[in-house]
Amino acid sequence: MAGIQLSLLALFSICLLLFTSGVFSATFTITNQCSYPVWPGLLSGAGTPQLSTTGFALNPGASTTVPIPTSWSGRVWGRTLCSTDPTTGKFTCVTADCGSGTIECNGAGAIPPSTLAEFTLNGANGLDFYDVSLVDGFNLPMLVVPQGGTGGGNCTATGCIVDLNNSCPVALQVIDNATGSECVACKSACETFGNPMYCCTGTYATPNTCHPTSYSLFFKNACPRSYSYAYDDGTSTFTCASANYVITFCPTPAASQKSSGVQGENPVATNISSSGNLSCTTSPFLFITTFVVILSVFRSSRHLN
Ligand SMILES: *[C@@H]1O[C@H](CO)[C@@H](O)[C@H](O)[C@H]1NC(C)=O
Ligand SMILES: *[C@@H]1O[C@H](CO)[C@@H](O)[C@H](O)[C@H]1NC(C)=O
Ligand SMILES: *[C@@H]1O[C@H](CO)[C@@H](O)[C@H](O)[C@H]1NC(C)=O
Ligand SMILES: *[C@@H]1O[C@H](CO)[C@@H](O)[C@H](O)[C@H]1NC(C)=O
Ligand SMILES: *[C@@H]1O[C@H](CO)[C@@H](O)[C@H](O)[C@H]1NC(C)=O
């Protein structure tokens, strides 16, 4: 009896130790499949751990893995058409600039329009919540694919894999001054017109009063799994337990359709066992730990007999 109590205490302590020491961090593998360079930006939410990088360059075809601490929340996006001014040394981007003047964003977020991948890791019930948002507009196609997750909900790929630069409504287009004609990003109606109806502000600040508009539907029809306006949660938020995430800019339509089916209908949520609640059993490490402790309980109780 005493042995079992002691072992439970030990198990609890090990759980606590592993969780507080941040062993169970995730990784983001950020890949650029665009034909042009992309400069990812990363912003940590208030009160969550900082990352080892807040911005870097990714050439076409390149990939970088960033370790993510437990319970991190924040966003990842891609800056395009970036350059360093030869006289001032200031780094700026035509789309999704963070205004830091350097490749690292140092706590600054994306200036809209910007496609955003948003994460809250190890949130309610120990689940990761993630989405790709076009609420702040669109600047490049982006796909988020969870890998190795132990289930815990609709743990599937999400994103916007269509290039909306060409189809963007004229009123929302961002034209590159360097070429004078090329649309390089697509603004949200909220940013363009500032109307509370588009921004879900004022009397429109509730899910019951703010509804899709023809502009938000332009984004939603092209990218059904992405957020198209503030209260688009039901079809745009995904959950997963203990996953790593692959974030891809410009996933090739053919490949991503084959592997994830993101374009078109939302697929049925994957149905892996929903052990998501018992936080101490969601990780393989803890399964092993539990096994070892239980083994020692048996051994010590045999000694006692
Ligand atoms: C193009 O130039 C105009 C006027 O200077 C400026 O307001 C706009 O932001 C520029 N567009 C881009 C994409 O930089
Ligand atoms: C979309 O914008 C990017 C720059 O952000 C540009 O390189 C790309 O060619 C544009 N796509 C289209 C289809 O115009
Ligand atoms: C995914 O699951 C969450 C949590 O149950 C739910 O709120 C959300 O609507 C689901 N998302 C989709 C796209 O079905
Ligand atoms: C997922 O599991 C639940 C509960 O076990 C079940 O009711 C549901 O039909 C399953 N869904 C699929 C797609 O298998
Ligand atoms: C998970 O937690 C929710 C509420 O926190 C509860 O309703 C549900 O029954 C739990 N599921 C399991 C498998 O423990």
Image: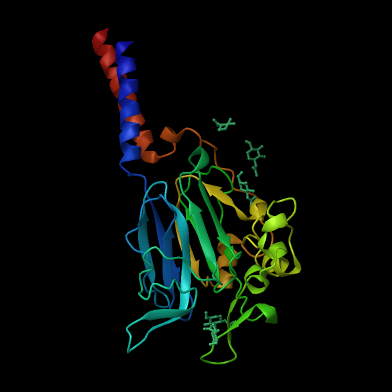
- Residue nearest the viewer, comparing 197 with 291: 197
> Splitting the image into 4 quarters, where does residue 135 fall?
bottom right
Residue 292 visible to an observer of this rendering:
yes
Look at the picture and state if 2 lies above or below 118.
above
| Residue 195, x across and y down, in percent | 70, 67
| Residue 95, x across and y down, in percent | 50, 77
Q: How many marks?
A: 0
**Image quadrant containing the N terminus:** top left
Which residue lies at the image location 41% right of the left edge and 33% below the top edge?
280
| Residue 7, x across and y down, in percent | 31, 21
> Would residue 136 appear left or right of 107 to someone viewing this image?
right
The residue sitting at the left extreme is: 303
The color scheme shown is: rainbow
> Splitting the image into 4 quarters, where does residue 8 fall?
top left
The residue sitting at the front extreme is: 202
- Residue nearest the viewer, comparing 230 with 118: 230
- Residue nearest the viewer, comparing 138 with 145: 138
The residue sitting at the top extreme is: 305
Quadrant of ligand 2 in image: bottom right
Which residue lies at the image location 51% right of the left edge and 35% below the top edge?
275
> Would residue 110 appear left or right of 22 to someone viewing this image?
right
Residue 158 visible to an observer of this rendering:
no
| Residue 305, x across and y down, in percent | 27, 7
Which residue lies at the image location 35% right of the left edge and 69% below the top edge?
104
> Would residue 13 appear left or right of 157 to someone viewing this image?
left
Look at the picture and state if 205 lies above or below 275.
below
